[in-house]
Amino acid sequence: GAVVSQHPSRVICKSGTSVKIECRSLDFQATTMFWYRQFPKQSLMLMATSNEGSKATYEQGVEKDKFLINHASLTLSTLTVTSAHPEDSSFYICSARKDRSYTDTQYFGPGTRLTVL
Amino acid sequence: AQTVTQSQPEMSVQEAETVTLSCTYDTSESDYYLFWYKQPPSRQMILVIRQEAYKQQNATENRFSVNFQKAAKSFSLKISDSQLGDAAMYFCAYRSAEANNLFFGTGTRLTVIP
């Protein structure tokens, strides 16, 4: 199998606080994980690519100082939304790839709904 | 940049019938991968089917099959014998053979009528 989990599934926080979202590959080692953002009734937009043991690669327009990504192990990547504001409210989805081959499929987590008050 | 277009925001199908979801894409690359993902109300993205551009044969997975027309840059999904559990948002996605990025279309919401 290829199961990816996310925690928490939903979080509500006050404006100005930081929120950490975890993405775990449960039954495989993921050298590469991806973070997406999905606004209501819209498609997924890639935010960044997280590689184990190295710095994340951010897509154009994504603030790296606001969305901190840490890929500390082969089964865990975290996304921290720092100083969250209401406009950061969204659905955040991670995905993981089993190996470094570009041919491999990305397996998605169930997503985390962030609401910033 | 690659673009993926799904021209049908919503589709409906009678249970047990067949429905086809459209997807077109724009790329200058010759080697790439195409995917259809399903996102049910739970929001979990589930891979439905995948097609390698270098393969001429259309991919099939049980009741799901694609019509891949490389020259026309078209990649439609056919769902046969539709079931109530097929109701979901369906996203078409493109990925270059040598890159990580998945480019998603805007999705098609499929309703299955009992």
Image (tube, helix red, strand yellow):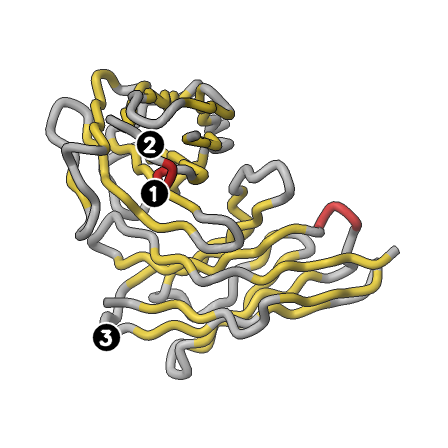
User: Which disc number belongs to residue B105?
Assistant: none
Residue at x-position 55% and y-position 72%: B22
Q: Give coordinates of residue B40: x percent, y percent.
A: 63, 44
* Separation of marks 3 and 1 at Cα, in angstroms: 22 Å
What amino acid is labelled 3 in the image? Ser
Left or right of A94, for residue A55: left
Question: What residue is disc 3 on?
Answer: B28
Residue occupying the far left of the picture: A54
Q: Chain of mark 2?
A: A
What amino acid is labelled 2 in the image? Lys
Residue at x-position 18% and y-position 41%: A63
Quadrant of res B114: bottom right
Query: Do the residues at pointers 2 and 1 share their chain?
Result: yes
Residue at x-position 39% and y-position 67%: B4
Question: What residue is disc 2 on?
Answer: A98
* Separation of marks 2 and 3 at Cα, in angstroms: 28 Å
What amino acid is labelled 1 in the image? Asp
Q: In the picture shown, does residue A12 fall above or below A104?
A: above
Residue at x-position 60% and y-position 68%: B21
**Mark 3 secondary-structure assignment:** loop
**Mark 2 secondary-structure assignment:** loop
**Mark 1 secondary-structure assignment:** loop
Left or right of B112, for residue A85: left
Q: In the picture shown, does residue A10 fall above or below B47?
A: above
Question: What residue is disc 1 on?
Answer: A104
Whether tag 3 and tag 1 are in contact, CB under 8 A, the answer is no
Q: Chain of mark 1?
A: A
